[in-house]
Each structure stands twice: as structure tokens, then as C-alpha cells.
Amino acid sequence: MINNIFGGASTSLINIGKNFGIQKPPSQGNFQAGATGNTATGQGTNMKTLNNLDGELMWSSFRLPGGGQMTARVFKADNFSDENPIIIVRGIDVCGTKFEKEVNINNVDPHNASIVEMLALDGYFKANGLPGSTTRAFVNAMAGKEATGGNVGEISAFSTFNFVEILQNHMKLFMKNQCQNGVAWLNPILDTLMNHIEQRGIERP
């Protein structure tokens, strides 16, 4: 169980760049707003880092390449502890279906993880003062692939991907195009992801 899942929390929006539109989080009793429509501009993600009121860590809304709008909120579970880092992700998938998923951060393998699991990991990273933008970087990478004619298929909240490989390839593209801002933005995200893998002894494929 989680505490007051629709409870509001007032903090500043993260500056996520001019290519990403800013959108207010859904209000209490209207959580489905924007779940299936194009309420966010372009391919960008809208994220809000929240204070720890009632365990809520992060709100996120984005359009998945090849799909529709997805909205999610990330919380600490009541039984969260350093030894048992349980995160709960609750939201609405691209088809308008509500979901709730309990995720143990220790079991998240970024080489084979769902978008929901990575949202949980992002919330955990943010709670510990680390760059929690893995999901946003993933959406950015897949949007770039789609824009250049690549086939990304249908993507849903529970689709699984090798996030490490996708983000490493995205980094190579930034470096090839000498995009210094892209490299500077993505590098700490990848470092945080690789530290998670090393600290938990996750085997690399």
C-alpha cells in the first residue's frame, strides 16, 4: 500500500530543455487527463521532482515513440528501507489502462527492464540525489530512431528493453555528431546506471 497517491506536492519543475514542453501534473480526481491524447509537445518528457510528502518521489508524463501518452507517479512503499528498497509506480498506460507495479530496486536489471521498472529506478536515483533521467534519455533515443525512419514498434509501459545498450548507442551518436551538450547531459545518467549495475552485482550480457 502507498500513502495518499494523489496527494499534491509543491516544488519547482526540472529544466529539461527547450525541446521538451512543460505540463502540469494531473490534479486530484482527474488523474486520467492526458493519458491517451497528445497533451505533451513532441516526443519530450515532462518530469517533476517532488518532495518526500507521503513518499511521493516523481511525476512523469511523456509520449512513447510508436505509441501514445503515458503518465506515471513514483512512490516509496510503506515498507521501504535501504535493505529492501521497494518503489511503487502507478499510472496510466498508452491505451488508457491504469496500472500499479511494485518494484524492488535491487532486482532491476537495466539490460532487460520494463519502462515501469526504469521509472522506479529513476525515482530511487532522484531520492538519493543522483541523475534520475534514464527514462527520459530512453524516450529521446527512441524518438531519434523513429524520426530517422527506424522501426521502434509498439511500446507500452511494460515493454522491456536493454536500456544500457540503447543509451550507449545514443552516446556514440552524440559523440559522432560532436554534440558536446548531449554528451555532457547523458554521461552522468550512464554513470549512475552503470554504478547501479556494479553495486548490485548484475551480470552484463
Image (spheres, rainbow, N blue to C red):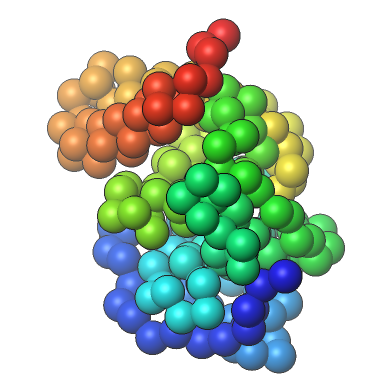
Q: Quadrant of residue 192?
A: top left
Picture layout, residue 110 above or below residue 60: above
In the displayed structure, does residue 82 sit left or right of residue 146? left
Measuring from the top left, give residue 51's x and y in whole percent: 38, 75
Could you tell me which residue is drawn at 72 percent across and 70 percent down?
1
Quarter of the picture containing the C terminus is: top right
Q: Residue at 71%, 48% (x, y): give it.
A: 157
Residue 61 coordinates in the image, percent (x, y):
55, 64
Question: In the drawing, does residue 134 fall left or right of residue 113?
Answer: left
One can see residue 167 in this view: no
56 horizontally vs 86: left or right: left
Classify residue 101 as left or right of residue 52.
Answer: right
**Residue 21 % position (x, y):** 41, 66
**Residue 127 higher or lower than 56, as above or below:** above
Question: Relative to 52, does residue 90 appear above or below in the rendering?
Answer: above
Q: Residue at x 71, y 90 (%)?
A: 29
Q: Can residue 187 be seen?
A: yes
Residue 189: x and y in percent read 33, 38
129 or 29: nearer the eye? 129
Query: What's the residue at 74%, 43% (across, down)?
Result: 158
